[in-house]
Image: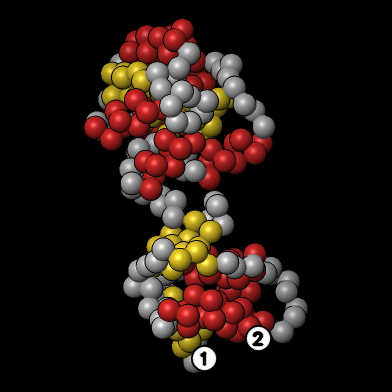
């Protein structure tokens, strides 16, 4: 199986290549984010080991770009940055795992094998329904090329509908997943937020994406209305 290592530290990249080849992998090495992105687009890999701080473009952007292009090759981020928000950004841009330098080669090898076993399961970074796009990581929404400004709660309701695209969800399900299980307020609050979404996402565009099914709940049309 072939791996791609995108790492600008020459000694580390060479050490990873030798170690992984000794374990039976074929390894390509790219010293910049630009080269890594080009190789990832041109070849099929069982997994990608991707440094974050790279010349050219960062590992974050390489990962984000591949996921936007629907390339689901498993990605293990490598970085000297160990802040929790660095890990959050790595995972939110579509990485599958995260390893902080310095690391044990045995641990890295175990993580790579786990990713290879899992394979390239599809995990869209941006949710889509017709011309509606929702980016959960950046918390941004578009209708076509028009950005839509939503409050945090409006965004949460829309994201839940998007993750259940084409399915009917009840008010209770929305409350349990967007508010919390012990919410004791008026369940009609869901209607209020659905109306807000329609006013922002549908009516200005002459569309009807969010359907009401009387006595059942709501459904977001797969084609965006």
The residues bearing labels 2 and 1 have C-alpha atoms spaced at a distance of: 13 Å
Q: Is residue 156 visible?
A: yes
Residues at circles 2 and 1 in contact by the CB criterion of under 8 Å: no
Question: Residue 155, position in %: x, y?
Answer: 58, 66
User: In the figure, is residue 225 to the left or right of 52?
Assistant: left
Q: Residues within 10 Å of mark 2 (few under 14, many from 20)?
A: few
Residue 145 is drawn in which quadrant?
Answer: bottom left
Question: Residue 139, position in %: x, y?
Answer: 56, 57
Question: Residue 121, position in %: x, y?
Answer: 36, 46
- Point out the image quarter for the N terminus: top left
Label 2 residue SS: loop
User: In the figure, is residue 151 to the left or right of 223?
Assistant: right
**Residue 139, relative to residue 165: is it above or below?**
above
- Point out the image quarter for the C terminus: bottom left
Give the mark toward the camera: 2 or 1.
2
Residue located 57% across and 41% down the image: 89
**Residue 132, relative to residue 41: is it above or below?**
below
**Residue 184, relative to residue 150: is it above or below?**
below
**Residue ID for mark 2:** 188
Q: Which circle marks residue 41 in the picture? A: none
Closer to the camera, 53 or 73?
A: 53
In the rendered view, how is the structure colored?
secondary structure
Closer to the camera, 172 or 203?
A: 203
Residue located 29% across and 28% down the image: 39
Chain-order first, disc 2 or disc 1: 2
**Residue ID for mark 1:** 215
Residue located 62% across and 26% down the image: 81
User: In the figure, is residue 150 to the left or right of 78?
Assistant: right
Residue 128 is drawn in which quadrant?
Answer: bottom left
Q: Residues within 10 Å of mark 1 (few under 14, many from 20)?
A: few
Label 1 residue SS: loop
Question: Residue 19, position in %: x, y?
Answer: 40, 11
């Amino acid at each position: 199986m072939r791996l791609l290592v995108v790492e600008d530290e020459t000694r580390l990249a060479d050490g990873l290549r030798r170690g992984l080849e000794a374990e039976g992998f074929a390894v390509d090495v790219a010293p910049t984010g630009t080269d890594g992105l080009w190789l990832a687009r041109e070849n099929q890999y069982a997994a990608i080991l991707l440094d974050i701080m790279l010349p050219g473009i960062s590992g974050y952007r390489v990962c984000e770009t591949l996921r936007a292009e629907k390339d689901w090759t498993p990605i293990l981020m490598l970085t000297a940055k160990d802040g929790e928000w660095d890990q959050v950004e790595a995972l939110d841009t579509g990485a599958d795992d995260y390893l902080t330098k310095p690391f044990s080669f045995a641990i890295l090898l175990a993580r790579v094998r786990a990713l290879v076993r899992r394979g390239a399961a599809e995990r869209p970074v941006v949710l889509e329904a017709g011309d509606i796009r929702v980016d959960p990581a950046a918390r941004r929404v578009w209708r076509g090329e028009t950005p839509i400004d939503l409050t945090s709660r409006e965004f949460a309701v829309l994201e839940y509908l998007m993750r259940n695209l084409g399915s009917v969800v009840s008010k209770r399900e929305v409350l349990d997943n967007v508010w919390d299980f012990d919410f004791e307020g008026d369940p009609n609050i869901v209607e209020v937020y659905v109306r807000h979404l329609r006013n922002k996402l549908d009516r200005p565009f002459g569309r009807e994406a969010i359907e009401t099914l009387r006595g059942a709940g709501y459904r977001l049309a797969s084609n965006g209305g």
